[in-house]
Image (cartoon, rainbow, N blue to C red):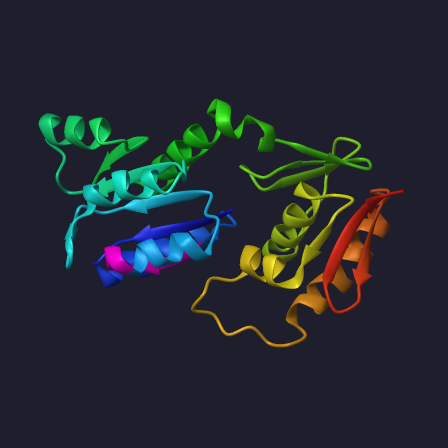
Amino acid sequence: MRILLIEDEKELAEALTAALGKYGIVTDHTAHLGDAAELTRQNPYDAILLDRRLPDGEGLRFIPELRRTGKDTPIIVLTALNEPKERVEGLDLGADDYLGKPFLVEELMARLRAVLRRPANLAELKITAGRMVIDPLHLSVTVDDAPLDLPRRELLVLVALAKRKEKTVLRATLEAAVYNYEEEIQSNALDAHISRLRRRLAEAGAEVSIHNIRGVGYLLREE
């Protein structure tokens, strides 16, 4: 899962990015609405976390602007402005959920799972490939009902490939699923993740294979 965090408190943003990373979430962060608009044009986010008090204005105005572009990305407002009338204002403007600060990361994760379970996102709840069942929301994989433990980055690569099984996935798409835009990506990092992932899937008897489409990307195929 890749999300956009629009938050001007640097320490909170860094802590939240690290905490969400433990759940396998890749987080792009910006403190400005202008940058957020550009990032949403460039990247297909699974969800957006939005503060209200931002250096370049009221965060809520970002919601109708995003909707006018045709994007229905779920938005959760995270803010200290948490009076009933303020929550109503945010929800009426199109927020999918509204969470007051301070909050527990566990509650935020539950709310993320809830907005992603809504009808428009139901198709991505679980993915079947070969003898595997992948749950992207809980970042779990089973092979014949037995858990398959994978390092976080390998699991993110697997989810990105499995969502598009039998189709070629561009290297850039896979890298975007694993790294945020601020991280420096070594030239062979993705290939190393794929190599280790292939070995683990073969050892587990997952009955899938990952093929290198030279110069383009990778493809996951059921055997």
Rendered location of residue 95, percent (x, y) = 28, 33
Judged left or right of residue 28, residue 120 is right
Judged left or right of residue 7, residue 70 is right
Q: Is residue 144 visible?
A: yes
The answer to which quarter of the image holds residue 36 is bottom left
What is the tally of numbered marks visible in this picture? Answer: 0
Judged left or right of residue 161, residue 19 is left
Q: Is residue 47 above or below residue 180?
A: above
Q: Quadrant of the C terminus?
A: top right
Q: Is residue 107 above or below residue 15?
A: above
Q: Give the camera-side residue of 9 and 29.
A: 29
Q: Is residue 187 above or below residue 133?
A: below
Rendered location of residue 157, percent (x, y) = 65, 54
Q: Give the camera-side residue of 185 and 12.
A: 185
Farthest residue in the right direction?
223
Rendered location of residue 217, percent (x, y) = 72, 61
Farthest residue in the top direction?
119
Q: Is residue 138 magenta?
A: no
Q: Residue at x 27, y 40 (%)?
A: 63
Judged left or right of residue 11, residue 185 is right
Q: Residue at x 56, y 55 (%)?
A: 177
Rendered location of residue 86, percent (x, y) = 12, 32
The boundaries of the magenta stretch are 27-34
Q: Is residue 15 visible?
A: no
Q: Residue at x 66, y 42 (%)?
A: 163
Q: Is residue 32 magenta?
A: yes
Q: Residue at x 77, y 64 (%)?
A: 195
Farthest residue in the bottom direction?
187
The answer to which quarter of the image holds residue 133 is top right
